[in-house]
Image (cartoon, rainbow, N blue to C red):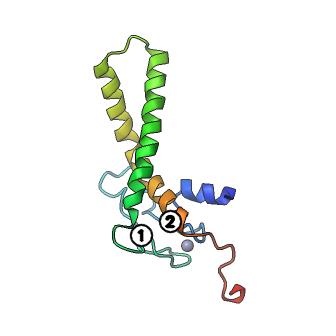
Amino acid sequence: MRFSTLKSVYQCKCPRCHQGDMFLRGKLLNPAQFSVMNKNCSNCGQSFEPEPGYYFGAMFISYGINTALFIAAWVALSVIYPDYSLKLLLALLGLTVLIFLPFIYRVSRSIWISIFVRYKDEDLPSSA
Ligand SMILES: [Zn+2]
């Protein structure tokens, strides 16, 4: 896997050309619009929803990321405040989910589509 692929996954760029945005730009922190996806890549035309229910598998990626995040928050709380209560732990986990939800939602979809759509370095007609 190349570095530009990791960068495009993190930035939620098109997996095929690494240029077009998968999601509406500047709406990450907007609760009503962080999940709105563009239908196609503005640069190469790659469809971002090849079939209905395409992103079902992204749910499992999101689950894995959230589990890692929960463990990190739990370890951090245990180190910073060893006498924590269960209420405090649950509040921290809830807050962590709310804060990272838009980012994890987008990145898990970006990871999912990057598994199935390969990067084309120079997607020009002459290279075909
Ligand atoms: Zn593209």
What's the residue at 67%, 58% (across, down)? Answer: 1
Question: What's the mark number on residue 38?
Answer: 1
What's the residue at 68%, 87% (across, down)? Answer: 128
Q: Quadrant of residue 88?
A: top left
Q: Quadrant of residue 93?
A: top left
What's the residue at 40%, 46% (across, down)? Answer: 63
Q: Gap between marks 2 and 1, in whole Å?
A: 7 Å
- Vertical relation: 118 (above or below) 7: below
- Vertical relation: 85 (above or below) 64: above
Q: Residue reaching furthest top?
A: 83
Identify which residue, 80 or 60, lies in the foreground.
60
Label 1 Cα neighbours within 10 Å, binned few <14 / some 14-19 / many ≥20: some
Residue 113, percent from left and from top: 49, 64
Label 2–label 1 contact, CB within 8 A: yes
| Residue 27 seen in render | no
What's the residue at 44%, 29% (across, down)? Answer: 73
Helix, strand or loop for disc 2: loop
Helix, strand or loop for disc 1: loop
Residue receiving disc 2 = 21
Residue type at numbered disc 2: Asp
Image-quarter location of ligand 1 = bottom right
Residue 40, percent from left and from top: 45, 75
Residue type at numbered disc 1: Asn
